[in-house]
Amino acid sequence: MFVVNNMGPEDAMRSASGEILRTALWGLMLVVSVVIYGSHAPLISLCRVGGQIPFSSSSVVLLIELSKLMISVVMLVIWDCKSGRLPVSWRLFMPYALPAILYGANNNLVVHMQHYMDPSSFQVLSNLKIVSTALMYSIFLHQTLSIRKWLALSLLTVAGVFYSYGGIQDLEKQSADTHLYISLQGLLLMVIYCLISGLSAVYTEMTLKTQKIPLNLQNIFLYSFGIIVNSLVHLTESDGRRFLDGFSIWVLVIIVSQALNGLIMSAVMKHSSNLTRLFIISFSMLVNGFLSYLLFQLQLTLLFFFAVFLIGLAVYLFYGIK
């Protein structure tokens, strides 16, 4: 059977231009996500007053979830409602309860861990998510990774180790806020954080790819549960702070940026995989290092640039060799 291709030169050119535009937008999304990931811990540090976090973490997380829900509703109305009636049922809705609970726990842990470590140590040690996510990705999604890809992921982890053991150093040693430090309690919280992160990410990817419904509708399901979970967390807090206590322009930047990053991550897990997410997290370590240099006068050392080299090599091994 012969298939006649009626596409003319102009149609082919428009198709090629459309593909280039989609690729460029996808790359831009990934770059924006790297920047947001890398700037999260420094932004929280900028919110400190007298060395303490002045706002309620549950208030911030709840506002992030509300922002993501509102954006998803608008995008659903603009893009997906034109296609006709959308499927809505409890069978499609309920699978998002578990990741909402796990995400809610981790989003609050991110803020609480800042009491037990500096921003750069948080960003470095959070690279343990590479190991936990890759293992759960292989187990739960039945994806067999080649030795070359495991080597690439191992290089990402090693890069984090070099970064943490001297990648950046206190230049003037004038403020305790710029010292690299982590307590035992902080380390234990980090292990829990990474395990939850791996489980929630892999489960979410599995759910997003299994359901054949628009991503915006899936996001509405997920963020609706997120609002419920974080509303309960906020109501049970007993720190005496009102909802907007301690808010500043930096808190608003955190809310907007994290809402945007949540939407980007949904698209990554729907159309790519958690392995792409791992590389985003690793590249964000470099952004964190440069921000620490600019904001907290931390000096970048040779180990930092060696970490940059290892991450580049990991990308080459994972994506470059066929």
Image: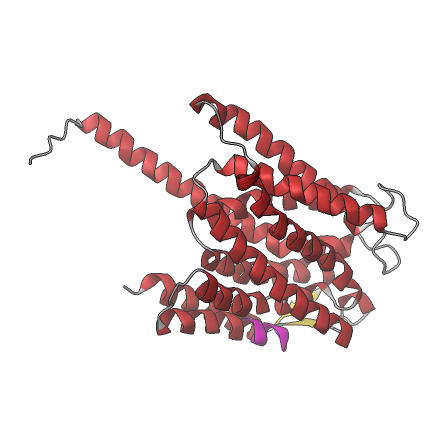
Q: Is residue 101 left or right of residue 320?
A: right
Q: Residue furthest right?
A: 240
Q: Quadrant of residue 10?
A: top left
Mostly what secondary structure, the magenta segment? helix
Residue drawn at 68 percent across, 42 percent down: 65
Colouring used for the render: secondary structure
Count of marks placed on residues: 0
Residue 269 visible in rendering: yes
Q: Indicate yes or no whether the magenta region holds residue 161.
A: yes
Q: Is residue 19 left or right of residue 138?
A: left
Pick the quarter of the image with the C terminus. bottom left
User: Where does the image place residue 27, in percent across and percent down from the top left?
Assistant: 44, 46
Q: Which residues are magenta?
A: 160-166
Depicted 237 relative to depicted 85: above or below: below
Q: Residue furthest left?
A: 1
User: Where does the image place residue 92, in percent across and percent down from the top left?
Assistant: 53, 40
Residue 175 visible in rendering: no
Residue 291 vs residue 258, the one in the foreground: 258
